[in-house]
Amino acid sequence: MPNADYFRELARQCRTLERAAIVPTVKEQLRVWSVELADRADEAERATRRARKNRHIAVDHRGFLGPPWQVRVIRRG
């Protein structure tokens, strides 16, 4: 999956091409892409931070349902 640096580099390339473009519609499309790519870079960065934060949160479910290795057996008969 592309990371924030990848999207930031694409946005930078779009801005560079926008400055060099002559046709107004091409300039506008490159500007739109550069903004969208910068937004995707920001979102990728936030997702990385969230994943890193969630990785450090430890949840102990054993206190709620008992030890995870304990299995109840129902005998019929």
Image (cartoon, helix red, strand yellow):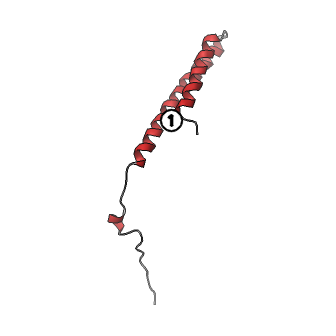
- Would you place residue 3 above or below residue 31 in this image? below
Q: Secondary structure at mark 1?
A: helix
At x 58%, y 36%, the residue is 2
- Would you place residue 62 above or below residue 40 in this image? below
Residue 40 placement, left or right of 67: right
- Residue bearing the label numbered 1: 44
- Residue 75 locus on image (x, y percent): 44, 85
> What amino acid type is highlighted by mark number 1?
Ala
* Residue at the right extreme, as displayed: 23
- Residue 13 falls in which quadrant of the image? top right
* Residue at the left extreme, as displayed: 63
Q: Quadrant of the N terminus?
A: top right
- Residue 37 locus on image (x, y percent): 56, 27
- Residue 3 falls in which quadrant of the image? top right
Mark 1 closeness class: few <14, some 14–19, many ≥20 residues within 10 Å: some
- Would you place residue 3 above or below residue 23 in this image? below
Residue 34 placement, left or right of 21: left
